[in-house]
Amino acid sequence: MTITEKILARHSGKASVSPGENVWVNVDVLMSNDVIAPQMIGIFEEHFGPAAAVWDTDKLVMIPDHYIFTADPKAHRNIDIMREFVRAKDIRHYYDADFIPPGFEGMPTPYSDPTKTPYMGVCHVTLPQKGHTRPGEVLLGTDSHTCTHGAFGQFASGIGSTDGAFVMGTGKLWLKVPPTLKFVFNGEMPPYLMAKDLILHIIGQIGHDGATYMAMEITGPAVMSLNMDERMTICNMAIEAGGKNGIIPADEVTLEYVRSRTDKPFDTVDADADAEYAGVYEWDASKIEPTVACPHSPGNGATAREKSDVKIDRSYIGSCTGGKTTDFIAAATVLAGKTVKVDTYIVPATTQVDADLDRCKVGDKTLREIFSAAGCKIGPASCAACLGGPVDTFGRANEPITVISTTNRNFPGRMGHKEAQIYLASPLTAAASALTGHITDPREYIRK
């Protein structure tokens, strides 16, 4: 069996499972955020009853992150519903705002309960940082990018509000076992390439629907040389190829990360030597060029070099895909000692990443000092403009603009204006482009 098949077999009490088989799966963690949680809560209360207890208060993680820093009353109502539910059900892992970032002083004061955990930021980076992602487990979330957590060698997938409500009441879900596609990156990662280039290369090759309802197992020497931030970037965008889940085998890098954040027991899972795959793709990572996805699909791939004539109005470095510490270190290596030519936003995924802007250095300067000196605008930790969110929302512009972004989607209207042109790229490419005002191959600034 493949890794995905083995995990689903273990969690359904079966010796083995096969692609296409339907099984009742026991869930280890359920996550929800402020976009879908209110609908999920409503369905739960309708079918289980307003007074019903959730299946396990220690296995639910709830996070307001998409619209936490907006004054929009409807968005705040979503968060109010979450807060009321968390208090009523005594949910143990709830990461709400306990501060007002600079520039947001006029907002309503967020609810802060000292018995709950403080605000962290984007759910898909918060969960690993707080030890909720563990090899061999099943993690479901009411957000399509829950597949991010497959980076830890677990089955992680996005589900809808109805399925989420059922899991919240029972701890189980009826799932169809997906077939597995295997993607192998051989060779070494050159310094101008990042995980974002690898996953954009995959999607560009197989298309935005090339892995529909399939597990995407990503491995090979180049992938296994990456840290957990980078592995998360790869699995984060499995859904952009239609994947049911993305998964990377757990190794010592995984175990070191997880064990430093949780003492809960877990078992790693490896694919059998004779595991059957629906298809196998192999590439030499050293021969892949810095890659972008052109409007309006993550599957509309091209090399940065091929798009060098595209002028940009803004560069955006942030989100669960491109707002982690490793992403900002990479961007800072390009921006250090230079000045951006276009508006450039730096938006940390979590408060821990935000703190790393002051803790981490490139040369003798901190990341925050480098970004500030380069003329970048640094925002508070949140999903922000990735989903057309608060103050840096491009949809607030009067005219459609062209943006290069480290986010995961470039659909029409995704970041605001329906006619905006969004190009997806790695932090290295986004930073290089910010310096020139057009899409720029980072090899112009980073050499072997």
Image (cartoon, helix red, strand yellow):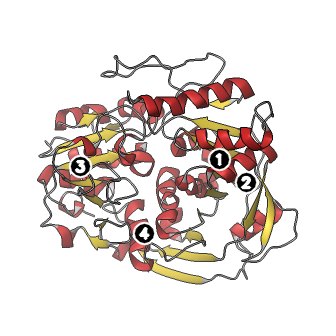
Q: Earlier in the sequence, mark 4 or mark 2?
A: 2
Q: Report the amino acid beneath label 4.
A: Glu
Give x and y (percent) for residue 334: 23, 49
Give the residue at mark 2.
137
Q: Is residue 395 above or below residue 58?
A: below
Give x and y (percent) for residue 276: 69, 83
Circles 4 and 3, Cβ within 8 Å, touching? The answer is no
Circles 2 and 3, Cβ within 8 Å, touching? The answer is no
Q: Quadrant location of the C terminus?
A: bottom left
Distance from label 2 to label 3 (Cα)?
37 Å
Which secondary structure lies at badge 4?
Answer: loop
In the image shown, does 382 or 355 lie closer to the viewer?
382
* Position of residue 265 in the picture relative to residue 107 (left or right): right
Circles 2 and 1, Cβ within 8 Å, touching? The answer is yes
Q: Residues within 10 Å of mark 1 (few under 14, many from 20)?
A: many
Q: Report the amino acid beneath label 1.
A: Thr
Give x and y (percent) for residue 61: 65, 38
Q: Earlier in the sequence, mark 4 or mark 1?
A: 1
Q: Report the amino acid beneath label 3.
A: Ser
Give the residue at mark 4.
188
Q: Report the amino acid beneath label 2.
A: Glu
Q: Is residue 16 above or below residue 418?
A: below
Which secondary structure lies at badge 1?
Answer: loop
Give the residue at mark 1.
133
Q: In front: mark 3 or mark 1? A: 3
Which secondary structure lies at badge 3?
Answer: strand
In the image shown, does 390 or 230 lie closer to the viewer?
390
Give the residue at mark 3.
315
